[in-house]
């Protein structure tokens, strides 16, 4: 077993020992709300826990955010309804709230929280402006995982000439992975995957008409791609797309640092 793997298992043991303390140490957590937030996930896995706000009530979200803030200094809430944003402001007045409207997301930071850069480079592309919310969710997660993120929006196949120059610039910048968000026919990820030498994550969005609408046609189109190097997440799963791209980019960045250390 490699030294890196040994370190990961030692860290896992340490985090499991700390989990109970971190969960119970937030004194403002409403006692009637049972939550098991995972503040050690990023250290253990490389991906932070994200609170899915769309289907949780406000008290649950506040309780989980409190546990994450105590354990890691940061809480990320996706699909945050407007009333949740205001409730979070009231519940955490001493913290910094970053609201990302296009992504429908909120990130809460302890005042001394410092997000470190990993050196990973992620590109985010959307086919149309209607795909931007899912693309922005992916961008937010990749940024919170320490990546440098470059976004290119509204370059879909209806006007494919719009893609060429921005995509060339993205490749020149040395991007490590690319997320492509597309609804309707979902063709753009296959186009991009057929042109670039880096992994592409297809992000189907729930944009479309009639039969095959709500992302079904886009999802099936991406799954049926003949372009190698394209992986696909579920419909509107910006968190999954962004975290996958960031994991790839962060591993590549680690390899770059290792190679530079040898020279």
Image: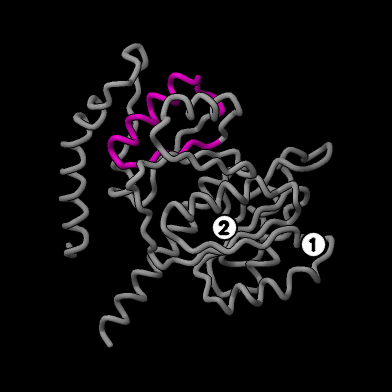
Q: Nearer the viewer, residue 223 or 147?
A: 147
Q: Residues within 10 Å of mark 2 (few under 14, many from 20)?
A: many
Work out whether mark 1 precedes mark 2 in sequence or the reverse, and give the earlier one: 1
Q: Quadrant of the C terminus?
A: bottom left
Magenta residues, dominant SS class: helix
Residue at the spot 83% in from the left edge and 40% down from the top edge? 209
Q: Position of residue 11 (x, y in %)?
A: 19, 49
Image quadrant in which you'd find residue 210: top right
Residue that mark 2 sits on: 201
Residue that mark 1 sits on: 157
The question of residue 75 being in magenta is answered with yes
Q: Position of residue 216 (x, y in %)?
A: 71, 41
Q: Tell me if residue 230 can be seen.
A: no
Q: Give the residue furthest to the front.
A: 94
Q: Secondary structure at mark 1?
A: helix
Image quadrant in which you'd find residue 39: top left
Residue at the spot 34% in from the left edge and 69% down from the top edge? 254
């Amino acid at each position: 077993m490699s030294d890196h793997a040994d370190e990961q298992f030692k860290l896992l043991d340490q985090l499991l020992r700390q989990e109970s303390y971190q969960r119970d140490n937030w004194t403002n957590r409403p006692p009637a709300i049972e939550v098991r937030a995972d503040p050690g996930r990023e250290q253990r896995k490389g991906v932070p826990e994200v609170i899915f706000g769309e289907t949780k009530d406000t008290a649950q979200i506040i309780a989980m955010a409190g546990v994450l803030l105590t354990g890691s200094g940061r809480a990320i809430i996706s699909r945050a309804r407007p009333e949740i944003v205001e409730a979070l402001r009231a519940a955490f007045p001493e913290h910094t709230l970053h609201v990302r409207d296009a992504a429908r997301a909120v990130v809460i930071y302890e005042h001394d929280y410092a997000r470190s850069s990993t050196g990973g480079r992620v590109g985010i592309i959307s086919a149309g402006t209607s795909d931007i919310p899912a693309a922005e969710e992916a961008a937010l997660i990749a940024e919170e995982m320490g990546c440098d993120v470059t976004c290119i929006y509204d370059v879909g196949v209806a006007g494919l000439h719009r893609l060429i120059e921005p995509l060339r610039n993205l490749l020149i910048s040395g991007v490590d992975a690319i997320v492509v968000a597309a609804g309707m026919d979902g063709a753009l990820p296959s186009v991009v995957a057929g042109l670039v030498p880096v992994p592409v994550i297809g992000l189907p969005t729930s944009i479309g008409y009639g039969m095959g609408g709500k992302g079904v046609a886009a999802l099936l189109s991406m799954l049926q791609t003949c372009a190698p190097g394209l992986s696909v997440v579920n419909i509107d799963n910006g968190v999954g797309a962004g975290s996958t791209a960031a994991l790839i980019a962060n591993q590549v960045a680690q390899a770059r640092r290792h190679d530079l250390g040898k020279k």
